[in-house]
C-alpha cells in the first residue's frame, strides 16, 4: 500500500511523536483539538478552550470525561496545564501549553523512521544472541528431524560404559547368487567366577563346627529321650536344648515334669510348675 500526499493546507501541524507514543486514541484527538486553538500567526503558546468544548469535539457528554486523556498528554509531555484565576480570584480557568516537539529526556520514537527501526530490532533477535550462538544454525534452519537426538558440542568424551563383553561381529558368507549374506555372531559375555567358600586359618571351612557338641547330662538325656517320641529331635536340636534343660533342672524343675511341660497342649493340659 502506498500513501501519497493530498491537498496541502497550512492549518494545524501535529508532531508525529504524539501519534507514535501509544496513548489512547481519544488522547490523540484531544491533542489535535488543543493544537487547532494555537494561533500560528500570533505565535501563541497557550490556549484556553473550555472542557465542555473539548468534550463535545471528542464525543463525550460530560466535561469531566476528558480529564483522564488530558492526564495522559501531561504525562507524555505533550501539554502543560496552568491554572489562571480571574474575577478577583473567585474563578479559575485552565490554560494549556501545547508542545510541538518532545522534551530532551523523551525515550519514545520521535519520527516514523525511528519507529520502524525499533520494530525491526524487536522482530530480529540476532543482536541479542551471543557470539557462540551466532555461529550455529537455528533449529528451524537445520535439516535434522525432531526425532533425531542432539549431538553434544562440548568435545568431552562420554564416560565409558561397563564392560559387557565384545560387540557383535558381522561375518560374510557367500550364497549361490554370489551375494554376501551378513550374519551376526552373538556377543561373548564374561561369566562371573563361582564363589569360593571361605576357609579358616587351619584350612577347614568356618561353616563346619570346629568342636563337638557338649556331652548331655543325665537329666537332659532323660528329658530329651522322653520328648523324643513326641518331638522330632536330631543331634543339633538336642545339643541346643541340653543347656536350657540343665538350667531348668537347676532352677527346681523335675525332669519328668519338664518333659511333660515340653510336650503338653497349652489349651487343655495344666502342668504344675515348681513352687506353684
Image (cartoon, rainbow, N blue to C red):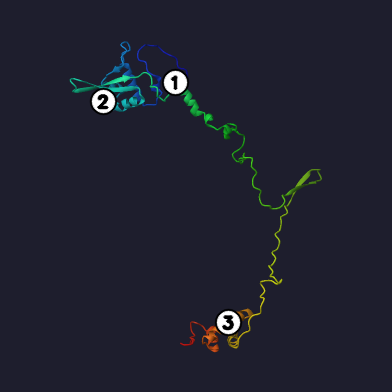
Q: From the viewer's perspective, tell me whether residue 251 is left or right of residue 204.
A: left
Dot 3, how many residues are within 10 Å of its Cα: few (below 14), some (14-19), or many (20+)? some
Q: Which residue is the site of mark 1? A: 112
Q: Secondary structure at mark 1?
A: helix
Residue in the picture at 47% in, 25% down: 118
* Marks 1 and 2, the one that precedes in the sequence: 2
Residue 95 drawn above or below residue 144: above
Residue 238, located in which quarter of the rendered image? bottom right
Q: Nearer the viewer, residue 241 or 53?
A: 241
Callout 1 touching callout 2 (CB < 8 Å): no
Query: Disc 3 and disc 1: Cα gap in Å?
Result: 108 Å
Which numbered disc, 3 or 2, marks the residue closer to the eye?
A: 3
Above/below status of 76 relative to 199: above
Judging from the image, what secondary structure is the residue with disc 3 in?
helix
Q: Is residue 43 above or below residue 123?
A: above
Q: Residues within 10 Å of mark 2 (few under 14, many from 20)?
A: some
256 vs 57, left or right, is: right
If you read the primary sequence from the N terminus, does the residue marked by circle 3 or circle 1 appear first? 1
Reading the image, the residue beneath label 2 is 63
Q: Name the quadrant containing residue 222.
A: bottom right
Amino acid at each position: 500500500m502506498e500513501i501519497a500526499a493530498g491537498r496541502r493546507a497550512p492549518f494545524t501541524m501535529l508532531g508525529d511523536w504524539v501519534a507514535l507514543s501509544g496513548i489512547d486514541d481519544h488522547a490523540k484527538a484531544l491533542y489535535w483539538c488543543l493544537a487547532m486553538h494555537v494561533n500560528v500567526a500570533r505565535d501563541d503558546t497557550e490556549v484556553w478552550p473550555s472542557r465542555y468544548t473539548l468534550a463535545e469535539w471528542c464525543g463525550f457528554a460530560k466535561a469531566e470525561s476528558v480529564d483522564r486523556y488530558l492526564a495522559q498528554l501531561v504525562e507524555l509531555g505533550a501539554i502543560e496545564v496552568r491554572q489562571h484565576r480571574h474575577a478577583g480570584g473567585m474563578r479559575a480557568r485552565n490554560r494549556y501549553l501545547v508542545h510541538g516537539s518532545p522534551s530532551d529526556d523523551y525515550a519514545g520514537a520521535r519520527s516514523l523512521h525511528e519507529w520502524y527501526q525499533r520494530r525491526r530490532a524487536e522482530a530480529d533477535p540476532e543482536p541479542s544472541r551471543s557470539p557462540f550462538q551466532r555461529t550455529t544454525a537455528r533449529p528451524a534452519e537445520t535439516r535434522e528431524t525432531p526425532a533425531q537426538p542432539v549431538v553434544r558440542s562440548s568435545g568431552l568424551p562420554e564416560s565409558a560404559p561397563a564392560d559387557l563383553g565384545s560387540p557383535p561381529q558381522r561375518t560374510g558368507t557367500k550364497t549361490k547368487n554370489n551375494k554376501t549374506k551378513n550374519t551376526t555372531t552373538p556377543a561373548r559375555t564374561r561369566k562371573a567366577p563361582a564363589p569360593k567358600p571361605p576357609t579358616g586359618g587351619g584350612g577347614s571351612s568356618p561353616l563346619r563346627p570346629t568342636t563337638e557338641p557338649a556331652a548331655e547330662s543325665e537329666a537332659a538325656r532323660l528329658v530329651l529321650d522322653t520328648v523324643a517320641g513326641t518331638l522330632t529331635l536330631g543331634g543339633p536340636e538336642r545339643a541346643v536344648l541340653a543347656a536350657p534343660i540343665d538350667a531348668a533342672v537347676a532352677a527346681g524343675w523335675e525332669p519328668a515334669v519338664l518333659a511333660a511341660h515340653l510336650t503338653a497342649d497349652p489349651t487343655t493340659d495344666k502342668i504344675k510348675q515348681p513352687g506353684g
